[in-house]
Image (cartoon, helix red, strand yellow):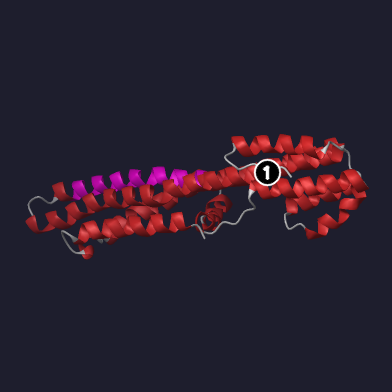
Amino acid sequence: MDLASLIGVISGLGFTAAGILLGSSLLLFWNMPSVMIVIGGTIASTMIAYPLKDFLGVFKTVGKVFIFKIEKPEELVKILIEISNKARKGGLLSIEADINTTEDPYLKSALQMTVDGVKTSDIAAVMQKRMELTHREHKIGYSVLASMGTYAPAFGMVGTLIGLVQMLANLDDPSSIGPKMAVAMLTTFYGALLANLFFIPMSDKLKLRSDEEILNMTLLYEGVVSIREGEHPRLMEDKLNVYLTSGGGKAPKKE
């Protein structure tokens, strides 16, 4: 569970609600036409901009904002060093047992190809392709949310224009001015709130998640290629530690 995301959403809603309650009732800020304009318009625009499967996939992707489990990069380096030492002493076939113990499908597949004697260039090509596909999938997820963060305020302005037109068209009826002005103002409020508390921050968090996953995949890629090439474990460790220091990770202490 990502406490930062959870606390951020709860506190954002809480502070907004508290600010409203200090001056009025929460019911004053509920307007169904405004909700329909902003949410309906945002969904419609997003579906126009992206294929249906990409739009529907964002609901699954949003879960990673709050629940995300990933191996620490420094732990992956330790695992790769152990496998490298084992391969150097007992040959590539000696790491076959590690295939069954590893939980990472990306590493499992790469190790299996290594044990099977697949050429280094072919292993590298397969791993790079899978990395590219993973990055593309991640990019679609956070791009959809970023687009929704753009569309929501825009439809807030559309709702404002609708409310103003309705208000100006009925100036001879004073009783209608209030409800029409509410639609005009609340759509802008809804659009800004959805964009800046949900869509844009979630997109940014998913970009961070993507960077973390790609960093891990890069470490595994470099490690497996080094193992397949028979490089010295210490050389491989030095190469992988470069990614940790540049990517914000902490390099493991050398034994």
The image shows residue 212 at horizontal and vertical percentages of: 59, 45
Residues drawn in magenta: 143-166
Per the picture, the main secondary structure of the magenta-coloured stretch is helix
At a point 76% along the width and 57% down the height, the residue shown is 102
Q: Nearer the viewer, residue 34 or 198?
A: 198
Q: Is residue 1 above or below residue 198?
A: below
Q: Judge from the rendering whether residue 159 lies leftward or rightward of residue 210; answer left or right.
A: left
Q: Is residue 103 above or below residue 92?
A: below
At a point 24% along the width and 60% down the height, the residue shown is 18
- Residue density around tag 1, few if under 14, some if 14–19, many if 20 or more, within 10 Å: few
Q: Judge from the rendering whether residue 189 lies leftward or rightward of residue 84; answer left or right.
A: left
Q: Is residue 20 above or below residue 204?
A: below
The image shows residue 27 at horizontal and vertical percentages of: 22, 65
Residue at label 1? Answer: 253
At a point 52% along the width and 60% down the height, the residue shown is 1
Quadrant of residue 215 within the rendered picture: top right
Q: Amino acid at mark 1?
A: Lys
Quadrant of residue 224 within the rendered picture: top right
Residue 254 lies within the magenta run: no
At a point 20% along the width and 55% down the height, the residue shown is 182
The image shows residue 167 at horizontal and vertical percentages of: 16, 50
Residue 154 lies within the magenta run: yes
Q: Nearer the viewer, residue 152 or 74?
A: 74
SS at mark 1 in the image = loop
Q: Judge from the rendering whether residue 86 lies leftward or rightward of residue 223; answer left or right.
A: right
Rendered-image quadrant of the C terminus: top right
How many numbered discs sit on the rendered protein? 1
Residue 150 seen from this side: yes
